[in-house]
Image (cartoon, rainbow, N blue to C red):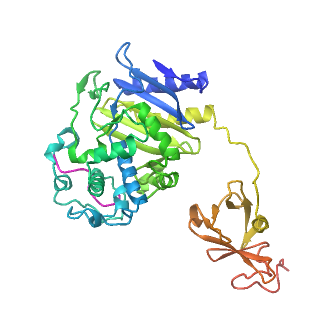
Amino acid sequence: MTTSQEELLPATRRALLHRIAVAQAEGRAPSLVAAVVRDGRTVWNGSRTSVDGHAPDENVQYRIGSITKTFTAVLVLRLRDEGVLDLGDPLEKHLPGTGAGEATVAELLAHTGGLAAESPAPWWERTPGSLRPELADVLGQQPFLHPAGRRFHYSNPGYTLLGALVEELRGAPWEEVLRREVLEPLSLHRTSARPQAPHAGGWAVHPWADVMLSEPLEDLGRMAPAGQLWSTAGDLARFAAFLAKGDDRVLSAESLLEMRTPAAPPEAADVAAGYAYCLGLEIRRSGGRLLIGHTGSLPGFLACLTLSVEDDVAAVVLANCTSGPLVSAVGADLVRIVAEAEPRIPEPWRPLRDVDPSVLELAGQWYWGTHGFGLRCTADGFVSLEPLSGTGRRSRFRVNGDGTWTGLEGYYAGERLRAVRRADGSVSHLDLGSFVFTRQPYDKGAAVPGGVDPEGWRGVG
C-alpha cells in the first residue's frame, strides 16, 4: 500500500515502493513507512506492514531515537547565533558542577568530549528515566574515557549535558524549549516527547523464528535530549527540507551549513567507510554521493533521515523493530533512485546584472609557480579559482567590499585573496595567503618570492 504524488514518474514511484517492500520483507519488520522530499516538498510516501489492510501512513508516530540529537543541536546553535554562548566555551562556563565541564560545547556536539558512550547500568534504553534523576546519575563517577577533543567517541550522556545546557540558559524544560523554538515554527505538530495516537508499537523480532516480543516504551527522563522523540514520516520530511535550506525563524542556512560540516576526527575505519560526524549530523558516502542526516534506534524502533544537498533529495525511513532492515541503506537507496531516475534540472544560466571592470580584468588564467589555475567571475557574485588540471585546491571567494575576497571552501577557506597592483594601476599578481599567482609561469614582471632566474626558461643543451 502506498500513497504518492504525481511529481514523480510512475516508474520512479514503483522503484521506491519495491525498495521499501524488499526492506520490510527481508528485514522482517512489523511495519515500515518512508517518505521522499525533493525541492523542499514531499513528493512520495509509502508503507508496508504485516497487518492485512492496515498500513501506517505519513502521520503515524514512530520513535526516532538519536535523530533527537539533531533537534537538540539546532537548539544549541540557536543559542550560539544569539550570542548567548560560543561553541568554544567549556561547559563549566554555563553549566557548572557537572564533573564534565572541561569539554567544550562544540566537542559535546561532535562527540569529541571524551565522555562514555552510555550511562551507568542498568541499560538506560529499557529502564525508566526516573532511575537517573540527576546529571550525576547519567555521567557516573568517571564520565571521561578519553581526553577531551582528541577522538570521536559517540556519547549519549554528552547530549544529555547539551539538553541540560539548553534548560539552564533558557530557564525552561528542554521539551518546552524544543516545541516553542523548533517544532511549532516548522509545523512539526506530530513530533513530541511522548507518543500520541496514532503511533506504532515497538517490537523485537526473534532472530531465529518469525515471532515477536513487545518492547517496553520507557520515558528516558534526563536522557531525553539524546533520544526521546517520537515523530512521523511527514514531520521528518519537513524537518529534512529545513536541514537542507534553513528557515530564518529557526536557524539560518549558514548555520545549517556549519552543522553539516565535519567536526570530529574520524577513526581509520570511519575514513575507509566514508563516515564523519558533524555538529549533530552524520555524513556518509554512498555510491559517490554525500548523504547528510542521522540515524536512530531504541528498543522496538529504527529510524533514518538522510539527504543529498547536491541532488536536493531527502528520504525518511521508519520501522518498528529492534533490529531488521538497515534503514540507512534503505534511505540511501531511496535518494539514489530519485536522483538517478529524475536528476535535478538546473536553474537557467543567467548573466551578471552588472560587473565591476576591476574584477573582470582578473578573470582568466593564472599560475602558482607552474600550476595553472582559472579565475572566473560567476553570476552569484563570487569569484572562483580552480586548477586547470581539474584536480587540486579550489575555492569560491566572497567579496569583502575593500578590493579583497575571502575563501569559502577547502584549503583556502578563510584565506584572503587580493590583487596587487603596480604604481600605474595595472595588476602585478594575485596574493592568496602569501602565495603569488602570476599571469605567466614565474613571470619576471611580478614580485615572485625568491626572484626568477634571469636566464629565463631554457631547454637542455
Please identify the dominant SS of the magenta region: loop
Image quarter of residue 279:
bottom left
Residue pictured at 20% horizontal, 55% vertical: 139
- Above or below — where is 208 with respect to 441? above
Percent from the top left, x then y, of residue 415? 59, 70
**Vertical placement of residue 25 versus 222, above or below:** above
304 vs 352, left or right, is left
Q: Residue at x 31, y 36 (%)?
A: 192
Extreme residue toward the right, this view: 461
Image location (x, y in percent) of residue 320: 33, 29
Picture quarter with the N terminus: top left
- In the image shown, does 154 or 157 lie closer to the viewer? 157
Image point (38%, 64%), residue name: 86
Res. 291 in view: no
| Magenta stretch, residue numbers | 111-121
Query: Residue 411 sits in which quadrant?
Result: bottom right
Relative to 6, is 393 above or below?
Answer: below
Place of residue 80 in the rendered image (x, y in percent of width and height, measured from the top left): 40, 59
| In-image side of 353 versus 58 (left or right) | right
**Magenta run includes residue 116:** yes
Residue sitting farthest toward the top: 53
Is 267 magenta? The answer is no
The image quarter in which residue 38 lies? top right
Does the image show residue 210? yes
Left or right of 406? Residue 55 is: left
Please provide percent x and percent y for residue 387. 70, 62
Q: Could you tell me which quadrant the C terminus lies in?
A: bottom right
Residue drawn at the location 31% of the way across and 30% of the way down: 321
